[in-house]
Image (tube, grey):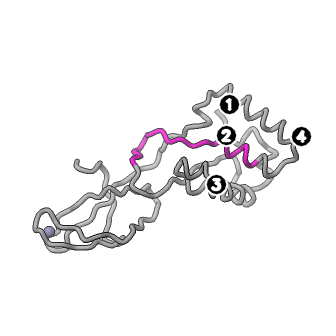
Amino acid sequence: MPEILEPFPEIRELGADRLRQICDEWCRGPVASEFGIVGINVSPDCTKLGPILQLSASNYNRGDQVHFPVDRIVNYIIDQTFPEAEGAILKARLSDLRKKAGPFVFQRFVVSIDAFNMATRCPSCSHGLISQHRIFRGQQFNVDPMDPIACPRCGSEFTPQSKDFFPVMGLPGE
Ligand SMILES: [Zn+2]
């Protein structure tokens, strides 16, 4: 299986900057939010597109299949860039590839990056508490202002800020 844009030299010729611009526009649309995609990485050689997923209390684990509608993004790039006749040829090529590779290659994306639970500690007794917030490796963690939490061990109340959280492997409650 080639990288998604390998069979499309016409699209790669647009260059990584232009492709990022078009992907950014797509990410502001309804399909992106439906799939929880907040950004798209374009590889410098313009062969690969990879999703940047929403940072929130998500349930994704390493190896989970995440829907990434890559063919819809490629169609969008074609619509934004090429005259209708040329675009129709590119779309036919995309559709042929999808038939050969099967729909899953183009519509699903396996998360191969590590996901972590964010944990915090009680400032009074250092008891560790695992939150429902999850983060992918390399992403910055920012939590909305929180209500105070009562420590289940010593009972003291505290209000953790983003900087008080640290990543741990494993699921809540484990
Ligand atoms: Zn405590």
Compared with 91, 142 (above or below) is: below
Compared with 93, 139 (above or below) is: below
Q: How far apart are labels 4 and 2 at the CA level?
A: 19 Å
Callout 4: helix, strand or loop?
A: helix
The N terminus: image quadrant: top right
- Counting residues from the start of the chain, the first of labels 3 and 4 encountered is 3
The residue singled out by tag 4 in the image is 85
- Counting residues from the start of the chain, the first of labels 4 and 2 encountered is 2
In the picture, measured across the screen, residue 76 lies left or right of residue 112, that is right
Q: Residue at x 68, y 58 (%)?
A: 25
Compared with 88, 144 (above or below) is: below
Q: Amino acid at mark 3?
A: Gly
Q: How far apart are labels 2 and 3 at the CA level?
A: 15 Å
Q: Indicate yes or no whether the magenta region holds residue 173.
A: no
Q: Amino acid at mark 2?
A: Asp
Number of the front mark, 4 or 1: 4
Q: Nearer the viewer, residue 80 or 123?
A: 80
The residue singled out by tag 3 in the image is 29
Residue 145: quadrant of the picture: bottom left
- Counting residues from the start of the chain, the first of labels 4 and 1 encountered is 4
Q: Residue at x 62, y 55 (%)?
A: 27
Q: Residues within 10 Å of mark 4 (few under 14, many from 20)?
A: few
Q: Indicate yes or no whether the magenta region holds residue 65.
A: yes
The magenta stretch is: 59-77
Marker disc for residue 71: 2
The residue singled out by tag 1 in the image is 98
Give the x, y percent position of residue 67: 53, 41
